[in-house]
Amino acid sequence: MKLHNYLLISIQIDLDDQTAIQFQEDLLSKIHKSGATGVVIDLTSVDIIDSFIAKVLGDVVTMSDLMGAKVVLTGIQPAVAMTLIDLGIHLQDVPTALDLEQGLIKLRQELEE
Amino acid sequence: MDFQSCVNIQKEWDIVGARQLGRDKAKELGFGTVDQARIATAISELARNIYLYAGTGKICFETINDMNHKGLCVIASDNGPGIQDISLVMEDGYTTSGGLGAGLPGVKRLMDQFDIISEPGKGTEIRTVKWVR
């Protein structure tokens, strides 16, 4: 979904590795086509993030950044956050926000900097 | 220990199948949502290792339910190339596949018990247990 210059994306399915890679490609081509400057990826319905999906998400943030679009991840569930830390994954350079609304605020801040 | 059920890991989608079955079993046993996520994530890492490094193998589940404790035992086994240096693969950040190198040390932290037996040329068996608190 597109709102102003932002893309809003919600992941609603249990991601297997191939779908995750496909998602990465689709998102980058969508940024390219739409000229979006900001992206919110909402993970509210995602109940598992393993090391592979974490890598794909971290990479897509870096890749979008290279293209000139900021990405904010939103809605990471408490159980998912705890599991990621157990795995040793900190996603430190990845901007996150509590929910979609906060994500849009964060995106605006990131873009103003 | 009452019964065992297994998921064969042959294609990528089986990773998702294994972790969904594991989560269902964890739910049945009365694990909370955080532990369900921990177990499902650990299974995902173990199943991916089988798929990436051994090609095929299986993930088996045993429910432990006796007087004193309740838990889920997850056993990942394959007949792949085995692991040459176990202490190396248990190091955070070590990877041969371009991943994050979080898999096995991560699984160890996610679960309560972790045992690994591997023989080069024969295969690997990883046995992990999570107890219901």
Image (tube, helix red, strand yellow):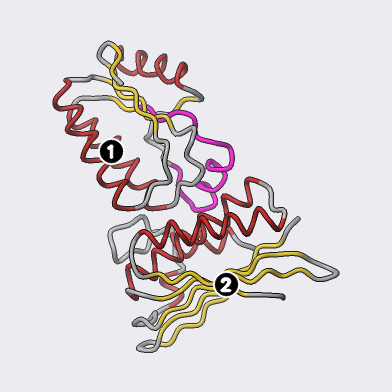
The magenta region covers: A72-90
Across and down, in percent, residue B27 comes to: 65, 53
Given residues B59 and B45, the one toward you in this image is B59
Chain letter for mark 2, please. B
Q: Which of the two discs, 1 and 2, sits closer to the camera?
A: 2
Residue B111 sits in which quadrant? bottom right
- The tag on residue A82 is none
* Image point (50%, 61%), residue name: B43
As drawn, A27 above or below A36: below
Whether tag 1 and tag 2 are in contact, CB under 8 A, the answer is no
Q: Secondary structure at mark 1?
A: helix
Which residue, given by chain and number where applicable, does mark 2 sit on? B5
Q: CA distance from mark 1 to mark 2?
A: 37 Å
Given residues B77 and B97, the one toward you in this image is B77
As drawn, B86 above or below A60: below
Q: How many circles with numbers are drawn on the protein?
A: 2
* Image point (49%, 23%), residue name: A99
Given residues A15 and A90, the one toward you in this image is A15
Across and down, in percent, residue B79 comes to: 39, 83
Question: Few, some or many C-alpha atoms within 10 Å of disc 2 (few <14, some 14-19, many ≥20)?
Answer: few
User: In this rendering, does residue B113 appear at all?
Assistant: no
